[in-house]
Image: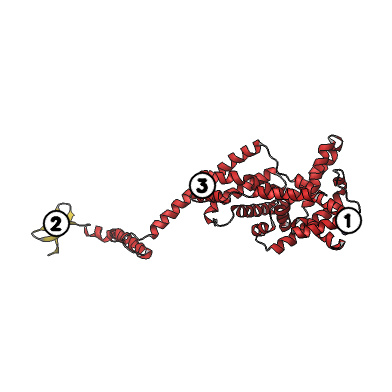
Amino acid sequence: MDFKRLREKSELKKSKSFDDEKDLKEIIKKAKKGDQKAFQELVEKFKAQVASIAYKMIGNYEDAKDISQIVFVKTYQNLNRFDTSKKLSTWLYRITINASIDFIRKHKKHRHEALESVGGELREKKSNVERAYQRNLIKWAIKKAMAVLNEKQKSVFVLRDLEGLDIKEVAEITSMPQATVRWYLHRARSKLRDELLRHYSGILEGSGIKYGM
Amino acid sequence: MGCKKIKKLILNYWDLTDQEKECFEEHLKDCPSCAKEFDFYHNSMEMIKQSFEFEVGENFWERYESALSKKLSKVATKSLILSWVEDFFQFLKTPIIGPLPTYLFSILIVLLFLIGLYPAFNSKSFSKRFENNLVIHEGEIFSTIDDGEVTIYLLEKK
Ligand SMILES: [Zn+2]
């Protein structure tokens, strides 16, 4: 394991996510006064991140699209209540997480069935396109493993480990103390690892990931 | 740090301070068992990240934008109507002549309304008065009853 390279990667991500806050505040002020163009700019700036978080929470592009649009409509309706001294991204991500959780609650039963059928389909296609199959199978296994996480575990895992936000920001978004965030993170990570080890280690091995006991 | 402690930290490697990370890495250099476990976890995580990478084409954003702008304009119209309603109520709340409180204003409205209705309440007695044919003769009011050929004059009021 090359630790130096690992760290450099994370530093790069940090500097990338650092926004020009002052510029952004001006746009928010304009949008608050009802400037449509300014609001459009905000959408442009955040749509990929919002849709990406929704996708990681739900695992489906079309639903992620709908959810992120709900987020922007809600933002549009409530922007006058936004405190400009705070970070807009924190506010937006909180709405995104909440909208995703709402969606999961509404579609719980239906989603479970959908995942099952994808798994069956993939098993049949094995002889056809081996590599694409392998890739899809890993995706399926991971989505299936993610399903064991509860709402809070999933939210913190998505924000911290998949989106790369720092724990302080995750705590603000989820309105939880940092220690609680750390606890849920630890639960999420160990649950995921155990799930992958127990049920899908064969699939992961096909991709080169080995874990010999 | 011993293996037991290190194994607990494997899941939280990314949350460690730089100093903790160094200790951790030192241990992994000399401990294949912990290193193996870390590798598995780290690789699985990379795999998870990859499978949740948000990759969409131009087409996605085109459809996204047109759907969103429709939803937003719908909301904008709704909020415009709402703001009109709000403005109207705001107008009712603001005093028209000096600091006239709302309840006084509404009492005034009710009074004006009742005054307007007054003739309707009295219309029956009004018409009764004119039921008979009245004739004024030398400052005196007579009511008349037609009986075919003769007309009878009755003194009504002096
Ligand atoms: Zn060890």
Q: Which residue is found at the position 72% from the left and 47% from the top?
A: A59
Q: Which mark is nearer the camera, 2 or 1?
A: 1
Q: From the viewer's perspective, tell me whether residue A132 is left or right of residue A68.
A: right
Which of disc 3 and disc 1 is earlier in sequence?
1
* Number of residues whose C-alpha sits closer than 10 Å to that of mark 1, classed few (under 14), some (14–19) or many (20 or more): few
Residue B57: quarter of image: top right
Q: Is mark 2 in CB contact (under 8 Å) with mark 1?
A: no
Residue under label 1: B30
> Label 1's element?
helix
Query: Most extreme residue toward the top, as rendered?
Result: A128
> Which image quadrant: the C terminus of chain B?
bottom left
Kind of residue at badge 1 = Asp
Name the residue rendered at 37%, 65% in the picture. Answer: B103
**Residue A156 horizontal side relative to residue A194, left or right:** left
Residue at 70% in and 51% down: A164
Residue located at (77% from left, 52% from top): A146
* Residue B76, numbered label: 3
Q: Earlier in the sequence, mark 2 or mark 1?
A: 1
**Residue A192 appears at what percent x and percent y?**
80, 54
State the image coordinates of residue A131 (x, y, percent, origin top left).
83, 37
Residue B64, by quadrant, is top right
Q: Nearer the viewer, residue B53 or B20?
A: B20
Disc 3 marks a residue whose amino acid type is: Ala
Residue closer to the observer: B155 or B104:
B104
- Colouring chosen for the image of the structure: secondary structure
Single out the residue that lies furthest toward the left: B138
* SS category of the residue bearing label 3: helix
Give x and y (percent) for residue A11.
71, 50
- Residue located beneath label 2 in the image: B135
Taking B96 as reference, is B64 left or right?
right
- The first of marks 3 and 2 along the sequence is 3
